[in-house]
Image (spheres, helix red, strand yellow):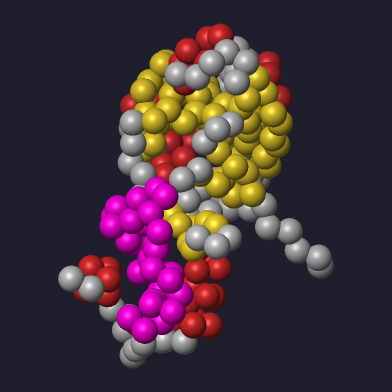
């Protein structure tokens, strides 16, 4: 079976540009695990022949997927499905969305979830009044069977109908309730994992990690989440697109 028979053809009568169509075909192939981490994709010349498009179209499609962190180029070897996860600082997406887009299966192990009055630190971070209701979620995040991150999230009570509304994805629950963040402020710093953190992630105490703190906001300016995550340094890269405006 040829590659094109496996992943599908481009629709020449589709008004979308051909490079975007090809991006979607390749992205779907990664999402459905036709390609998995470290797999090589066909050379640009072969893809151009298979899909009957120019090599410029193929290169533009691949460039976009490289920028998304789905593909990586290796000098002298070709283009491969990225094994490390590249977390974009310029795109507001959830852990589950990031993993699914890369053909990984996300799931979580709950450490704790609770409801209660906001703490002084949470009130400052979320702009809430003393005594406000918040929901707290503490999880270990996985991609396939590999540990990826420890996550602590606090969500104002007005964002969810109940704590039970959150299943596998916090952002999915927030979207269903009409309170998914539309913008966020994030900050990043390097950390060394404590013994407790290392045990939870299956790494060694002192191993390097990435600490990312995010405050998400609704369109009306109210806070929607305060999340602190500790990512494995051997599995994550953080990228950001910069423009000279």
Q: Nearer the viewer, residue 241 or 222?
A: 241
46 relative to 203 in the view: left or right: left
Where is 86 relative to 229, above or below?
below
Q: Nearer the viewer, residue 133 or 125?
A: 125
Question: What is the quadrant of the N terminus in the image?
Answer: bottom left
Q: Quadrant of residue 214?
A: top right
Outermost residue toward the bottom in this view: 13
Residue 67 at x, y percent in the picture: 58, 60
Outermost residue toward the front in this view: 76
Question: At 38% across and 54% down in the image, what residue appears?
Answer: 39
Q: Is residue 89 visible?
A: yes
Question: At 33% across and 31% down in the image, what residue appears?
Answer: 145
Question: At 40% across and 59% down in the image, what residue appears?
Answer: 40
Q: What's drawn in magenta, residue-wise?
A: 22-50
Residue 222 at x, y percent in the picture: 62, 40
Outermost residue toward the left in this view: 1
Where is 9 relative to 114, above or below?
below
Question: What is the quadrant of the C terminus in the image?
Answer: bottom right
Residue 57 at x, y percent in the picture: 49, 81
Q: How many marks?
A: 0
Question: At 43% across and 54% down in the image, what residue appears?
Answer: 81
Examine the structure image and report whether residue 17 is included in the region drawn in magenta. Answer: no
Examine the structure image and report whether residue 32 is included in the region drawn in magenta. Answer: yes
Q: Nearer the viewer, residue 193 or 123?
A: 193
Residue 171 at x, y percent in the picture: 45, 41
Q: Quadrant of residue 173?
A: top left
Outermost residue toward the right in this view: 245
Q: Is residue 182 visible?
A: no
Q: Nearer the viewer, residue 134 or 60?
A: 60
93 relative to 125 in the view: left or right: left
Where is 197 relative to 94, above or below?
above
């Amino acid at each position: 079976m040829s590659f094109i028979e496996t992943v599908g053809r481009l629709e020449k009568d589709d008004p979308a540009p051909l490079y975007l169509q090809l991006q979607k075909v390749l992205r779907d192939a990664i999402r459905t695990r036709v390609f998995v981490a470290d797999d090589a994709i066909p050379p640009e010349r072969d893809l151009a022949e298979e899909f009957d498009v120019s090599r410029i179209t193929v290169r533009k499609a691949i460039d976009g997927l490289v920028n998304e962190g789905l593909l990586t180029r290796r000098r002298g070897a070709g283009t491969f499905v990225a094994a490390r996860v590249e977390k974009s600082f310029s795109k507001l997406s959830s852990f589950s969305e990031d993993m699914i887009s890369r053909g990984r299966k996300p799931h979580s192990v709950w450490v704790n979830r609770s409801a209660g009055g906001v703490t002084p630190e949470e009130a400052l971070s979320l702009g809430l009044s003393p005594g406000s209701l918040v929901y707290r979620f503490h999880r270990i995040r996985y991609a396939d069977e590999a540990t990826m991150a420890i996550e602590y999230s606090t969500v104002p009570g007005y964002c969810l109908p109940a704590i039970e509304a959150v299943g596998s994805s916090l952002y999915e629950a927030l979207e269903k309730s009409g309170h998914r963040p539309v913008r966020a402020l994030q900050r990043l710093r390097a950390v060394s994992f404590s013994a407790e953190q290392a045990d939870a992630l299956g790494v060694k105490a002192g191993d390097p990690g990435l600490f990312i703190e995010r405050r998400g906001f609704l369109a009306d300016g109210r806070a929607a989440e305060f999340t602190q995550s500790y990512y494995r340094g051997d599995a994550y890269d953080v990228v950001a697109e910069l423009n000279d405006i």
